[in-house]
Amino acid sequence: MSAGTLPSNVRDPGFPTERENYLTNSKGFLSWFCTLDHKRIGVMYLIGTVTAFLIGGLLALGIRLHLFSPEGWLFTDNWLGSSVDKNTIYNQVFTLHGAIMVFLFIIPSIPAALGNFLVPVMLGAKDVAFPRLNLSSFYLWMFGALFFIGALLSSGLDTGWTFYTPYSTTTDSSVILATLGAFILGFSSIFTGLNFIVTINTMRPPGMTWFKMPLFLWATYATSIIQVLATPVLGITLLLLIAERVMQIGIFDPEFNGDPVTYQHFFWFYSHPAVYIMILPAFGVISELISVHSHKHIFGYRFIAYSSIAIALLGFLVWGHHMFTAGMSSLTTIIFSALTFTVSVPSAIKVFNWLATMYKGSISLTTPMCYALSFIFLFTIGGLTGLFLGTLATDLHLHDTYFVVAHFHYVMVGGTLIAFLGGVFHWWPKMFGRLYNEWGGRLSAAIVFIGFNLTFLPQFVLGSRGMPRRYATYDPEFAYLHQMSTIGALILGIGLLIALVVLIASLVNGKRSPANPWGAATLEFACTSPPPYYNFERAPVVGDPYDFHDIFWDAENERYVTAEPEREIVPQTVPEESPAHAGGQN
């Protein structure tokens, strides 16, 4: 349908001017350093989390290369002039890898980077509820990250990212500095969660009821609840750990009548909900991707929305399955095992609804869709293998083996990282106004998928045969599985490198992106790409975020345009001429 034959109510934002474009409307270091614009803060989070991921990824490659040989290949005694032995170096490297990936990438990547950019735009608002708090959260994250990495690099940390007692109360490595860094990062997470809760509660535009919100907002809201309620528990636990090391008051250290298992209870009461801080936003991203790139209304919208809240609440009740081997009564283990299984119900609802959405849909195998399909496969394996760890009998055999490593990576990396990549490719044209090379994007998705499975599928076998995790050397009979895993890690690294090159190249020579490159119906695609500083000239008309009947392909201009939905106008739903919220300025 050409532009000339479209109805008069068709909306085509076109392209922004230099002055309207949030990236170029003001220039200079201070315009970014002091910005209150949620989009710029989201971009700064994106750069920060991707940098952390690259550091953590290089450390992961170092671990895998070391394990290519049963005696350890990469790290040697006095490696790079260090005075410590090779096994200690290995412990410090995998601790650094785990800590960076969990605290600096997986937890903040989607909520802080994509969430900051998208939440207000999806709401049709100008900014988040508390723009200054938002900027403070970012600088707390930056300060915490620098403090955290500095502490880990200065004197090393070999406790693993969990800081388990009693080892963390007795080791000479930099536990206090590292836990202080994690404590600061926790504040950033709480502030971000609070901001999103208030923003979604108070700044939805006229006509956007709870059940007209995009599912990414539901996922962000559920994640924010966990961030606000669970993160303080981790903060208190880390402070108690510091107090134990400094004052030896007998909380966790058995030498002073403390109980190290208490630390595990406190830690996992936060950290198991934190698993859902990592994966719930990924669910939200995938819900958007599946619907848009299948060009079909999401199936079971309310079930997906409710399942996000259900996962957030049930996530607080299942921490005990991490301690089946730490000593619990039979009744307690049965209760925690049963509760763990209940979480699989809302998770399965989501997968079922995604598959039902794709059924008879008009699927476009775009780069985001390739990553979304990859996510469903990988997360399903991660979820199903979690059942073995939630069952007492099998967990006793598999506990602290490579099976746990593989399961964890299938959920966290196969879930969060893949969804993050899919989300970045989906919203990249919106964020930067440039289209990327689709062939290169799809190639990256295929190589990442192959590399990921070659890396972690052998680790299920390793774990089921009794190979413990965290070991710097191993029995030669496991060599071929470790070597397959190392080759897979190298392939995975190549796939991720291609993805990074494709995205960066688009900034240099990519075609200008139209407002709605995918034919989506959510509000962020109603403004230009990249969005203007104030997001919208006036509050947009709210419709069903998954109704594609009003989206038309304009063959003449080769882009999607939108016919604003007709609705009954009542005074309470008339949009204001300017966005209701007066956010910050540069």
Image (cartoon, rainbow, N blue to C red):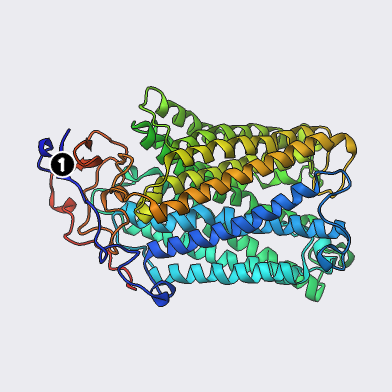
- Disc 1 designates what residue? 567
Examine the image and state in which quarter residue 546 appears. Answer: top left
Residue at (47% x, 57% y) in the render: 113
Left or right? Give the position of 349 relative to 95. Answer: left
CA neighbours of label 1 inside 10 A, class few (<14), some (14 to 19), many (20+): few
Q: Position of residue 14 (x, y in %)?
A: 22, 51
Left or right? Give the position of 71 relative to 319. Answer: right
Left or right? Give the position of 210 relative to 286. Answer: left
Count the marks. 1
Q: Position of residue 250 (x, y in %)?
A: 82, 68
Q: Identify the secondary structure beneath mark 1.
A: loop
Residue at (32% x, 49% y) in the render: 513
Q: Position of residue 526 (x, y in %)?
A: 26, 49
Q: Residue furthest top?
A: 360
Q: Nearer the viewer, residue 576 or 266?
A: 576
Kind of residue at badge 1: Arg
From where the camera sits, is residue 336 visible? Answer: no
Q: Residue furthest front?
A: 509
From where the camera sits, is residue 199 visible? Answer: yes
Q: Position of residue 352 (x, y in %)?
A: 48, 28
Residue at (47% x, 64% y) in the render: 44
Q: Nearer the viewer, residue 381 or 241?
A: 381
In which quadrant of the rendered image does the N terminus lie?
A: top left
